[in-house]
């Protein structure tokens, strides 16, 4: 029996579409069918005999299709979640040389200013990386992690030792503001770092009004000069991370074009996570404008990918396409709290970097040799295991649930004091992107030329983005 | 009633590449870096 939560109809231009949630399938449909299904989806009564007949016809088709379609593959079921901690955010320095206006970490200190020492680093490795479980990812985070370069170097040495001893294959990444540069640092990046994310908020005027030094001075010139020097020989994968506030809500395309001129491997653009009463907060109109531009940026990324340019900002089209071609279901937003954790300078463990400082989610400390068996650690971990879209009230009846995986647990907690309820803005974001981008993807796969171009480009793109230093490239056969 | 299914199966050969790319695209550092937040590797 088809349920209203298992289909969705929408239009793009003159064309109407039907999406079936369970088999992850999309159809072009005629206007009358769209009108009738939309009424059913909205719970509106069908008033005419024609509408009843069309609903019966459409319902029979959908039920038949769902029965015959191959079963969707769930990407990560609760039962499949292993104990392995694949990703760790390492808070090397809870200090920063900048005072970004939107910083959620209290100028990078999270209320506990300090730097990670070697003993805490050793305990972290012993706690999470001793089991011979293969690949792990460390992301150096802060504050500004390069303010503790000493422990960063010790991490690389320790990673090498663990690799030689067959304990773990650790890949190193960093999120940095780009203001620290020396020949020693750049050589370290060349030798040890696989992935770098530079935080930069676009053109100088935007960057300067929200990312300034502790003294209030501009850092744009020095940061961009350093970023160019860091990246000129292409020794590591790198991307930009950009925060949009009220100052730039209507300039997303301009921000994107500016950052693209540096030729990064990716550009992540998100709105500032600030309280509603903050002068940086996007009001509803500004947020809708922001999403409209995000759609355009993704559309541009998709087009440039097919046309053979450097692929950047190409995230949602990839996700959507992947879910359709493999008929996959996502049950989670991310691996936070299970296979991804964060360790603070003092060794406290949290479900991810965004939860650091939220006492309710402190899972323990790496100084505890039995940390991962402790009741508190297990209970918090289990909360995240249980938070599937099928369990989350507000997600379980949404047509987009398996293309989404639910909103970020931290955003939900910040808004509702609970990691389960979906955040309304996230829902708007995901649904808008799907309805706007899916028709583009449909046009792409229905054209023999663009479909062939897509297949040609994929192997190259994967190798380029993920083929260096320790990450084996996927090959397209 | 007119219903036309959009067929994605012809892209099956790309599954592995797609899985790798989506696995490695990251929530916290979106844009191409890797932090391990995606489905387990």
Image (spheres, coloured by chain):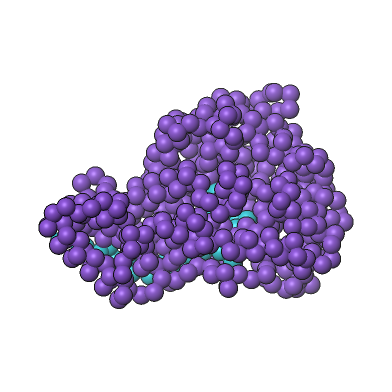
Q: Colour of chain B?
A: cyan
Count of numbered circles in the view: 0
Q: Position of residue A106 (x, y in %)?
A: 72, 36
Q: Residue furthest left?
A: A49
Q: Is residue A399 above or below residue A240?
A: below
Q: Which residue: 48% across, 63% down?
A: A390
Q: Position of residue A277 (x, y in %)?
A: 58, 29
Q: Which residue: 51% across, 46% down?
A: A423
Whether residue A390 is visible: yes
Q: Quadrant of residue A108?
A: top right
Q: Quadrant of residue A82?
A: bottom right
Q: Quadrant of the N terminus of chain A?
A: bottom left
Q: Is residue A201 above or below residue B6?
A: above
Q: Position of residue A180 (x, y in %)?
A: 73, 38
Q: Is residue A268 left or right of residue A174?
A: left
Q: Quadrant of residue A281?
A: top right
Q: Colour of chain A?
A: purple
Q: Residue furthest right?
A: A119
Whether residue A310 is visible: no
Q: Is residue A4 left or right of residue A394?
A: left
Q: Which residue: 53% across, 56% down?
A: A333
Q: Nearer the viewer, residue A290 or A234?
A: A290
Q: Is residue A420 above or below residue A132?
A: above
Q: Nearer the viewer, residue A30 or B24?
A: A30
Q: Position of residue A11 (x, y in %)?
A: 26, 48
Q: Quadrant of the C terminus of chain A?
A: bottom left
Q: Is residue A243 above or below residue A337?
A: above
């Amino acid at each position: 029996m088809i349920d209203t939560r298992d289909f969705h109809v929408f239009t793009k231009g003159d064309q109407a579409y039907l999406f079936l949630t369970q088999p992850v399938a999309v159809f072009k449909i005629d206007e009358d069918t769209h009108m009738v299904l939309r009424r059913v989806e909205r719970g509106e009564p069908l008033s005419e005999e024609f509408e009843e007949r069309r609903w019966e016809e459409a319902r029979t088709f959908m039920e038949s299709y769902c029965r015959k379609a191959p079963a969707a593959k769930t990407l990560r079921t609760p039962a499949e979640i292993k104990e392995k901690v694949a990703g760790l955010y390492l808070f090397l320095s809870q200090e920063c040389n900048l005072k970004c206006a939107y910083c959620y970490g209290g100028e990078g200190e999270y209320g506990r200013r300090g730097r990670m020492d070697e003993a805490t680093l050793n305990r972290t490795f012993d706690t999470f990386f001793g089991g011979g479980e293969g690949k792990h990812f460390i992301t150096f985070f802060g504050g500004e992690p390069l303010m503790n370069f000493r422990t960063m170097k010790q991490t690389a040495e320790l990673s090498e030792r663990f690799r030689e001893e067959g304990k773990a294959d650790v890949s190193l990444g960093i999120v940095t503001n780009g203001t620290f540069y020396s020949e020693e640092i750049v050589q370290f990046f060349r030798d040890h770092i696989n992935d770098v994310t530079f935080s930069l908020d676009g053109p100088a005027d935007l960057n300067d009004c929200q990312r300034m030094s502790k003294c209030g001075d501009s850092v744009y010139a020095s940061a961009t000069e350093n970023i160019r020097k860091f990246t000129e020989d292409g020794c590591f994968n790198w991307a930009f991370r950009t925060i949009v506030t009220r100052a730039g809500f209507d300039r997303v395309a301009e921000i994107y074009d500016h950052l693209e001129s540096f030729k990064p491997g990716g550009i992540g653009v998100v709105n500032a996570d600030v309280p509603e009463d903050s002068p940086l907060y996007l009001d509803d109109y500004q947020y809708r404008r922001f999403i409209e531009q995000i759609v355009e940026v993704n559309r541009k990324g998709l087009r440039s990918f097919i046309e053979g340019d450097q692929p950047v900002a190409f995230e949602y089209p990839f996700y959507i396409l992947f879910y359709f071609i493999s008929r996959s279901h996502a049950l989670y937003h991310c691996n936070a709290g299970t296979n991804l954790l964060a360790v603070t300078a003092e060794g406290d463990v949290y479900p991810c970097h965004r939860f650091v400082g939220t006492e309710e989610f402190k899972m323990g400390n790496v100084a505890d040799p039995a940390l991962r068996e402790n009741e508190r650690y297990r209970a918090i971990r289990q909360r995240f295991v249980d938070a599937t879209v099928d369990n989350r009230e507000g997600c379980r009846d949404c047509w987009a649930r398996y293309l989404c995986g639910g909103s970020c647990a931290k955003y939900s907690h910040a808004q509702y004091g609970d990691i389960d309820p979906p955040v309304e803005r996230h829902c708007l974001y995901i649904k808008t992107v799907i309805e706007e981008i899916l028709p583009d993807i449909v046009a792409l796969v229905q054209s023999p030329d663009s479909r062939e171009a897509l297949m040609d480009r994929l192997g190259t793109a994967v190798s380029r983005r993920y083929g260096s230093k320790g990450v084996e490239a996927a090959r397209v056969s | 009633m007119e219903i036309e299914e959009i067929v994605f199966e012809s892209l099956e050969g790309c599954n592995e590449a797609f899985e790798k790319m989506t696995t490695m695209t990251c929530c916290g550092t979106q844009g191409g870096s890797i932090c391990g937040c995606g489905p387990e590797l």
